Image: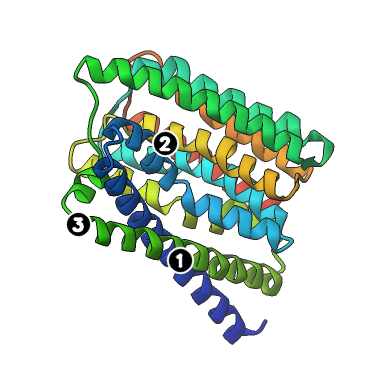
Amino acid sequence: MDFLSLLKFILFLVVGFALLVKGADWFVEGAAGVAVKLGIPEIIVGLTIVAMGTSAPEAAVSITSAFKGSADITIGNVVGSNIMNVAIILGLTAVITTIAVLKTTIFIDIPFTLAVTLVLLVLGLDGQVSRVDGVILWVLFIGYLAYLFIWTKKNKDNGEAEESDEIEAGKKLPIWKLFCLIVIGIVLIVFGSNVAVDGAKGIAKICGMSDRLIGLTIVALGTSLPELVTSVTAAKRGNADLAVGNIVGSNIFNILFVVGTSALIIPVTFQAAFIVDSIIATVVMVILFLCVVRKKELNRLGGFVLLISYLAYFIYLLVK
């Protein structure tokens, strides 16, 4: 094994992830600030720009991977991120503090996540997610956005809507700085995704790991960093009540927006092995549902159950 080359590609991966996370952060802050200054309702900004901003790393890496002929990283990244978001991020957050869960999250968002995960599985049974499949995912994505707008409008009228940190920060900056943040954020996201994918491919080649395994683990963890930082920070501040809804929403965005967009640009290969991974993603969501449905909260025991479920999945990946 070429140790120096391995070290170089690990550095690529770390630098790429750092650029992705910072780029997504600046893009969201800038875009949210501009939108609010242009008179777009804050709640709409939160549902679109801010929500999709946390999926920007997954989108950038997945699309870049597809273009570079590493489609296994594309699906692996999305499915792996979704499993990590629930099993690791929510697991860790729940261990830190009990998370209250909204009824709409339990009875609408979680079942919808299960449904779109199964839709992705069915669409991929023929060996690829085609452009037509991408259209189907985008139709579902637009439908989900419409539901969010209606639900949040009702919530806002009841005084229950919350303003995100990104919108609050964006309000304080002059518009020229906000545009600079948008441009710099996009540049960092694009460049960071290229560097991260090159690093992941290099590590896979040197270590004899498949693109699928790299996508499901290392790349998935790296692109889930925004969700991890946000959820754990919120838990420490005592504001973790919306953590489950945010993570579930991110998973929906990952499948419908990220895979849908990638497929519209270039058909994405769906390995037979991803069938098992998609089933695991479904099982993890079922475990989450069972943990929260009775008491409308995710407690420490539920957090440990989720963490153990990911450990079992990780062992499966290693020994398979």
**Percent position of residue 200, x then y:** 60, 66
Q: Secondary structure at mark 2?
A: helix
Which amino acid, by three-letter code, is at mark 3? Pro
Residue positioned most to the front: 38
**Percent position of residue 118, x then y:** 66, 27
Task: Count how many numbered circles sit on residues in the image.
Answer: 3
- In which quadrant of the rendered view does residue 9 lie? bottom right
Which amino acid, by three-letter code, is at mark 1? Val
Q: Quick check: 297 left or right of 314?
A: left
**Percent position of residue 24, x then y:** 40, 55
Numbered mark located on residue 247 in the image: 2
Residue found at x 26% / y 41%: 36
**Percent position of residue 238, x then y:** 18, 37
Mark 1 → mark 3, Cα distance in angstroms: 20 Å
- In which quadrant of the rendered view does residue 65 lie? bottom right
Question: Relative to residue 74, is residue 83 depicted above or below?
Answer: above
Q: Earlier in the sequence, mark 1 or mark 3?
A: 3
Residue found at x 41% / y 36%: 247
Q: Earlier in the sequence, mark 2 or mark 3?
A: 3
Label 3 near label 1: C-beta < 8 Å?
Answer: no
Numbered mark located on residue 187 in the image: 1
Numbered mark located on residue 174 in the image: 3
Question: Which class describes the residues within 10 Å of circle 1: few (<14), some (14-19), or many (20+)?
Answer: some
Foreground label between 1 and 3: 3
Question: Which class describes the residues within 10 Å of circle 2: few (<14), some (14-19), or many (20+)?
Answer: many
Question: Relative to residue 156, is residue 121 depicted above or below?
Answer: below
Question: Which class describes the residues within 10 Å of circle 3: few (<14), some (14-19), or many (20+)?
Answer: few
